Image (tube, coloured by chain):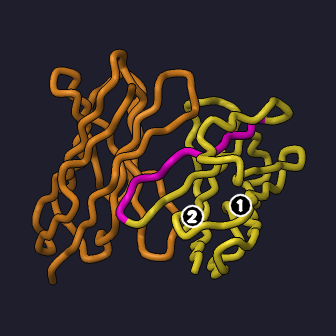
Chain colours: A orange, B yellow
């Protein structure tokens, strides 16, 4: 069965520091991979997605993620974090051609001024 | 254009009561999804509607949960005889027909069962 693991429940970084949020998935074939962000009181917003092609994906708000098949990972990165990035981040996986997303349990990001 | 909207934003109910949660998808989106997000958990898929096809109800946790959708518009999620473990945020999302298309999420309904 497919699964998604986000090993870090909470992460705290200082404003201006770099950020990497980890995501590991379990799936036999090439999955569809997503990162969503959920700000307090807001719905989930898609940051970026990977289906095929270039393994480095650029998203909104300066985020990027890299698909590494050998490590079954899809880590989210940002070179310089802003205070407004404080939120909860969810990684999700879907099997190709289907609509069912499997979500990780999320990583809550705190940004120190 | 308007995004996905959900109502109510918050619902407090007593154990054993029935509740109805509403979702208005983005106009033109044929696919609609319901998810449940318990505190500290990821999102759990509940049900999927695509056009006039039979819905995929495989994620509904019990027969107390049901959902309907009128054509390609509004959907309601009904929970009968609510239990305390039903307390969660219920999220609705919509997308266009293709499975690879982005799911756009509403702000959710926070349900508290006392």
Q: Please give the label number shown on residue B51.
A: none
- Magenta stretch mostly in which secondary structure? strand
Tell me the residue that label 1 is attached to.
Answer: B79
Quadrant including the N terminus of chain B: bottom right
| Residue A60 is inside the magenta segment | no
Quadrant location of the C terminus of chain B in the rendered image: bottom right
Q: Position of residue A64 (x, y in %)?
A: 27, 46
Mark positioned earlier in the residue sequence (1 or 2): 1
Distance in Å between CA atoms under marks 1 and 2: 8 Å
Magenta-drawn segment: B40-50
State whether residue B38 is above or below residue B45. Answer: below
CB under 8 Å between discs 1 and 2: yes
Compared to residue A104, the image places residue A14 above or below, namely below
Q: Chain of mark 2?
A: B
Residue placed most toward the observer, B14 or A87: B14
Q: Residue at x 35, y 47 (%)?
A: A104
In the figure, residue A69 lies in which quadrant?
top left
How many numbered marks have been drawn onto this rendered protein structure? 2
Badge 1: residue crowd in 10 Å (few <14, some 14–19, many ≥20): many
Residue B79, x across and y down, in percent: 71, 61
The image quarter containing residue B13 is bottom right
Q: Which residue is mark 2?
A: B86
In this view, the residue farthest toward the top is A29
In the figure, is residue A74 to the left or right of A61?
Answer: left
Classify 10 Å Cα crowding around label 2: few (below 14), some (14-19), many (20 and above): some
**Residue B95 position in % (x across, y down):** 65, 43
Q: Element under label 2? A: helix
Residue B18 is left or right of residue A76, and the answer is right
Say which element carries label 1.
strand
Judged left or right of residue B80, residue A11 is left
Q: Chain of mark 1?
A: B
Residue A107, image x, y percentages:
27, 59
């Amino acid at each position: 069965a497919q699964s998604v693991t986000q090993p870090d429940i909470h992460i705290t970084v200082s404003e201006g520091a770099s950020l990497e949020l980890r995501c590991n998935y379990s799936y036999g074939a090439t999955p569809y991979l997503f990162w969503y962000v959920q700000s307090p009181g807001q719905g989930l917003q898609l940051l970026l997605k990977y289906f095929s092609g270039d393994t480095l994906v650029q998203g909104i708000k300066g985020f990027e993620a890299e698909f590494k098949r050998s490590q079954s990972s899809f880590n989210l990165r940002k070179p310089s974090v802003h205070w407004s990035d404080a939120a909860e981040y969810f990684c999700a996986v879907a099997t190709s051609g289907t609509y069912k997303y499997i979500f990780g349990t999320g990583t809550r990001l705190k940004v120190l001024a | 254009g308007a995004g996905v909207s959900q109502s109510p934003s918050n619902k407090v109910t007593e154990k054993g009561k029935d509740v109805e949660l509403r979702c208005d998808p983005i106009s033109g989106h044929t696919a609609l999804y319901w998810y449940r997000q318990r505190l500290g958990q990821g999102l759990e898929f509940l049900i999927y509607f695509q056009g006039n096809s039979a819905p995929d109800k495989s994620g509904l946790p019990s027969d107390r949960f049901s959902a309907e959708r009128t054509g390609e518009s509004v959907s309601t999620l009904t929970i009968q005889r609510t239990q305390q473990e039903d307390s969660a945020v219920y999220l609705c999302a919509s997308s266009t027909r293709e499975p690879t298309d982005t799911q756009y999420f509403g702000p959710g309904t926070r349900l508290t069962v006392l």
